[in-house]
Image (spheres, rainbow, N blue to C red):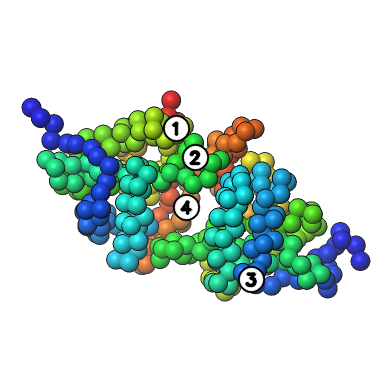
Amino acid sequence: MSIQDITLSDAFQIRYTEASDETFLREWLFSKQTIQWFSVSDEAEVEEMAKIWISYSRFKCSLTATYQGIPCGIATLFLMPYVKLIHQSMVYLVVDPKLQRKKVGTALIRNLDHLAANYFKLERMHYEVFGPNPLIELLQKLGYHKQFTQQRYVKDKEGYLSRTVLEKVFKA
Amino acid sequence: MKDPVTLRVSIEEDKPFLANWLTDPDVLPWFPLNNAREIEDAVKIWVGYKEQGSAFTACYDGIPCGMAVVYLQRYKKLKHQALFAIILDKNFRGKGIGSRLIEHLKKVGKEQFGLEILHLEVYEGNPAKNLYDRLGFQEYGRQPFFLKEPLGVYRTKINMQLELK
């Protein structure tokens, strides 16, 4: 079995996120390859973000991809706290940098779309993507469209990155 | 003649004023809040920014008549920009108090917090958008169907921002 097609293998599975996945999440977020696409920039910030992120798992709105039983990606609905906003949600997604471009992200996005539309009855979902993150292209392939781009949203040593919000509509 | 309007950092005692303004049925449609619990929660977060010196209250003859808050970002990569919110007692609209509050946010935002960009979210139909247009805020994106009233009416969220030069 090739690692190229792990989404077709029995060793690849998707399950609800568990609190113990936080260690993996922190490790992925802190990697050089990943941190450039997130708003966090040091260990303390990564820890804070990972804690908030994993806390959503108690609502069963977060999915973890595993390969050979080891977590390799997480996608989470950041459910809205106010009644007037609960028909839509922002999504956060991260894939283990060692297993990117193996369709883990695709599987997570598709499964989370399904969970959002059928279980949470969401009408629309949003991803917030910074800079020229290749996630934009993947989301567009999977039916998301660019809603708007806000320039200079992120600022780091290299300069500014934009924020692009992509949307998928489940119920018009 | 003494100016009856003063601006200061918000204090704990301003909370009931803010809750009262948000509860007004003419105001509530322009906020994503729906009930007393949500309003209480939002008031707590809003006034909580007084600890960082970024929640402000306008008073008319010493009585609160409007408030504004800059939601300072927690992460370093985002600290150069911030979202803000503003609300006025409806009996004090049209007196330039909203403009003064926003001008104050711009000044403090740049000088005290090092902000380069102030941005806001306003729901389509809110007359406050005229004020934001007048003060130079530029629209950068719309999100149709972002807010859904309990009776099923949807509202478009308009995102605007201003560079603090």
Q: CA distance from mark 1 to mark 4?
A: 32 Å
Task: Please state the chain letter of the residue tagged with numbered disc 4 in the rendered image.
Answer: B
Nearer to us in this view, A25 or A63: A25
Residue at the spot of label 2: B79
Query: Mark 2 or mark 4: which is in front?
Result: 2
Identify the residue at horizontal 35%, vertical 42% (top origin).
B54
What residue type is disc 2 on?
Lys
Q: Is residue A167 left or right of residue B156?
A: right
In the rendering, at what x and y percent does residue B44 appear?
A: 33, 57
Q: CA distance from mark 2 to mark 4?
A: 28 Å
Identify the residue at horizontal 35%, vertical 61% (top origin).
B41
* Label annotation for residue A109: none
Residue at the spot of label 1: B114
Residue A164: which quarter of the image? top right
Q: CA distance from mark 3 to mark 2?
A: 31 Å
* Label annotation for residue A18: 3
- Please, what secondary structure does the residue beneath circle 4 have? strand
Q: Which badge, 1 or 4, comes first in the chain's sequence?
A: 1
Q: Is residue B135 left or right of residue A126?
A: left
- Please, what secondary structure does the residue beneath circle 1 have? loop
Q: CA distance from mark 1 to mark 3?
A: 39 Å
What residue type is disc 4 on?
Pro
Task: Please state the chain letter of the residue tagged with numbered disc 1 in the rendered image.
Answer: B
In the rendering, at what x and y percent does residue A105 appear?
A: 72, 58
In the rendering, at what x and y percent does residue B80 appear?
A: 49, 36
Q: Residues within 10 Å of mark 2 (few under 14, many from 20)?
A: some
Identify the residue at horizontal 37%, vertical 63% (top origin).
B149
Residue at the spot of label 4: B144
